[in-house]
Image (cartoon, helix red, strand yellow):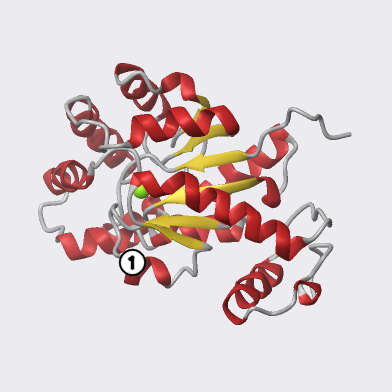
């Protein structure tokens, strides 16, 4: 039986959502791959970053270690994105917050700690937990015994939206991060967030809409087919009854 005090889970991407690390990450990668252009780098975030680098230049396994050796010490000099601390403080009252990132967990925790933000998160899941965000999202479902209707992912890249979708999870895309709204739109996110101050309201709106569409049914997992119908229903304002109600497909 569901506990009364169970809160919904907000999954937070780290780079581009909580810290503006694009220039640092690009420069660190450029040190390792001198021919890397910004255009190519942006493109890497349209998929899983580790897989995209592998396609780009047959990345050696040592490249990640070299990247983090350059990136991590400089990360600690970067400030938190303006407005984020107040928003996290507010959200942590109502929701359980988890970081899902391709950066390593321990420096994220240290960085959050430095900015007095670590206590707002119940877990940090970095690249050391798994390189796939699909797998990390599935781990969250399993560990916390939640389904897609109990969570949403806040991220700034198309690749993240697609990985979340692959795990059946919807995303709210922030447009102040790495990718532009046009690129993010290709992943058909459940909504857009212009500024950190808009995060709580968009989360509220999302869960409200989701509840309206889902009615009282609580599917264990939203399939890809279910996701498409959900997005269609939003766009075309179809009646809720047309939605797949048990998550098992059409
Ligand atoms: Mg990001």
Relative to 150, say whether 2 is above or below: above
Image quarter (top left, top right, bottom left or bottom right) of the C terminus: bottom right
Position of residue 195 measured from the top left corner of the image (x, y, whole percent): 33, 50
Image: 117 above or below 63: above
From the viewer's perspective, tell me whether residue 70 is left or right of residue 169: left
65 left or right, relative to 230: left
- Choose between 100 and 210: the one closer to the eye: 210
Q: Could you tell me which residue is drawn at 51 percent across and 47 percent down?
A: 133
Question: Residue 15's spot in the image, x, y percent?
Answer: 32, 42
- Judging from the image, what secondary structure is the residue with disc 1 in? helix
Residue 230 image-quadrant placement: bottom right
Residue in front for this viewpoint, 149 or 127: 149
Q: Is residue 160 above or below residue 187?
A: above
In this rendering, position of residue 63 left or right of residue 154: left
Q: Quadrant of the N terminus?
A: top right
| Label 1 neighbour load within 10 Å: few <14, some 14-19, many 20+ | some
Q: Total marks drawn? A: 1
The extreme right residue here reads: 1
Instruction: Give whichever of 131, 144 is nearer the camera.
Output: 144
On screen, residue 199 above or below 104: below
Across and down, in percent, residue 237 comes to: 64, 78
Q: Residue at (16%, 46%) from the top-left corner?
A: 23
Residue 17 seen by the camera? yes
Query: Can residue 168 be seen here?
Result: no
Q: Provide the residue designation for mark 1.
A: 181
Name the quadrant containing residue 157.
bottom left
Q: Is residue 237 left or right of residue 26?
A: right
Q: Residue at x 14, y 61 (%)?
A: 37
> Ligand 1 near label 1 (Cβ, under 8 Å)?
no
Q: Position of residue 53 (x, y in %)?
A: 32, 55
């Amino acid at each position: 039986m569901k506990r009364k005090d169970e809160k919904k889970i907000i999954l937070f991407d780290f780079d581009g959502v909580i810290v503006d690390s694009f220039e640092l990450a690009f420069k660190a990668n450029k040190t390792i791959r001198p021919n890397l252009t910004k255009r190519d780098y942006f493109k890497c975030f349209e998929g899983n970053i580790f897989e995209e680098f592998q396609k780009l230049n047959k990345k050696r396994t040592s490249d990640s270690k070299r990247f983090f050796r350059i990136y991590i010490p400089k990360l600690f000099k970067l400030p938190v994105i303006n407005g984020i601390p107040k928003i996290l403080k507010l959200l942590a009252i109502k929701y359980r917050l988890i970081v899902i990132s391709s950066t390593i967990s321990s420096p994220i925790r240290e960085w959050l700690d430095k900015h007095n933000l670590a206590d707002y998160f119940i877990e940090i899941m970095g690249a050391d937990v798994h390189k796939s965000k699909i797998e990390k999202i599935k781990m969250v479902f399993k560990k916390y015994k939640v389904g897609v209707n109990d969570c949403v992912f806040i991220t700034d890249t198309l690749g993240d939206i697609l990985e979340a979708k692959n795990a059946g999870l919807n995303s709210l895309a922030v447009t102040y991060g790495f990718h532009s709204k046009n690129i993010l739109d290709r992943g058909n996110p459940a909504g857009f967030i212009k500024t950190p101050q808009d995060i709580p309201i968009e989360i509220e709106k999302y869960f409200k809409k989701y509840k309206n569409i889902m009615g009282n049914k609580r599917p264990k997992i939203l399939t890809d087919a279910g996701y498409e119908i959900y997005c269609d229903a939003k766009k075309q304002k179809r009646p809720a009854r047309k939605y797949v109600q048990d998550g098992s497909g059409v």
